[in-house]
Image (tube, helix red, strand yellow):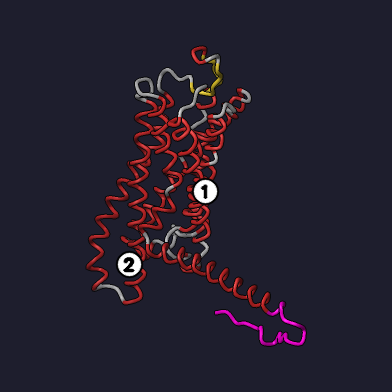
Amino acid sequence: MDSKSNIDYIVYFILPSLIFILGIMGNVSGLIVLESKRLQKIGPITTYRILFITDIIYLLSIINSNFEFFGYDLSIISNFWCKSYTYAINAISSIPPMLLVYISIERFISIRYPARTAFMRKKSIQFAYFFLTFLFNFIFYTPVIYLYEIITIMDIGEKKICTFTDTGNHLFVMIFTNRVFLPFLLMFTASILLIHTIFQSRSRIQSNYSYRENITFRKDIKFAITSLTINVMHIVLNLPFIIGYFIFRYSITLIVLKLIMLLFLTSFAIQFYLILVSNWLFRREFYSIVLKKKLKNSNENVLNQRIKFVSRKSPNQRNFTGCQETFV
């Protein structure tokens, strides 16, 4: 890409940079909000934390994409680095969908069988699930080490790129199965069960539970709706990438492929904002943190102004005992 147009700058640099910035800000904000004591006993909080951290790690790949746009492709440093980088990126990108599966199943159990949900909310169980998911993905994507290598394209000035040399669509089958089909099947099943259970739960809220149990149950339903929202958006944002990039990659333009890739990257940046929009409990904690920060900054500004005012007085006029402030 020697001569870069305005569209090239927008599609290849500006939009990925915006996704990176908003994604990092959102995922970091999510980690901060999850520290709230009010959220600790609601849902698989540890899995949400791991989800945000994994999304942050994957979004870092955008840095290499931006360097590549300006002719500094870090993935072609060596053939070993090309294989290692693509292997790690593919394995990490398939972890969030399986974490969403765990959240969906936990949400179903929390509503359908409330007495049994404590088991899946244990930190040890959530960490064990993440470890098994991590191990499975890194073993599953081992063939990527053999499918990727640095090749030279003569048509564009002997440019070297790190790409897959799979002519039999083995990589497509692997990614489609592990990143889309299997998570989609599990999330779809859990989501259908969730929807059915949520409609059934209305009578339970009104009759079978005490007032305190009703409040807890309503919170569980809110997180179930959040889980459904994330599941739907994950599928919507991932399917175009799989279909376009691996099936029609030879019949559509590079810019269209990049736009499809941007949709895929968005799925790693949007989790926090989906939760913020769809869950009032999460939104309340976020606003609480923001307002406390603003109040603290406002109080500090007032204090600094008063200190400056007093410091401008003569020594005989200063009354430091009158400068003591209590902020609520």
C-alpha span from label 1 to label 2:
30 Å
Q: Earlier in the sequence, mark 1 or mark 2?
A: 1
Between 107 and 162, the residue placed more toward the observer is 162
217 or 249, nearer to the observer: 249
Amino acid on which the number 1 mark rests in the picture: Ile
| Image quadrant in which you'd find residue 81 | top right
- At a point 32% along the width and 62% down the height, the residue shown is 221
Q: Kindly indicate the quadrant of the structure image that contains residue 113.
A: bottom left
Against 290, is 238 above or below?
above
Q: Which mark is residue 24?
A: 1
Looking at the image, residue 271 lies above or below residue 170: below
**Residue 181 position within the rendered picture, expressed as x and y whole percent measured from the top left:** 35, 36
Query: Dot 1 surroundings within 10 Å: few (below 14), some, or many (20 or more)?
Result: many
Give the x, y percent position of residue 98: 43, 44
Give the quadrant of residue 179: top left
Q: Is residue 84 magenta?
A: no
Residue on which the image places disc 2: 218
Residue 290 rendering spot, x and y as whole percentages: 50, 65
Mark count: 2
Screen quadrant of the C terminus: bottom right
Q: What stretch is highlighted in magenta?
A: 310-328
Q: What element carries label 2?
A: helix
Q: In this view, does 23 lie above or below 288?
A: above
Amino acid at pointer 2: Arg
SS assignment at label 1: helix
Asked whether disc 1 touches disc 2, contact meaning CB atoms under 8 Å apart, the reply is no
Question: Of the residues tagged 1 and 2, which is closer to the observer?
Answer: 1
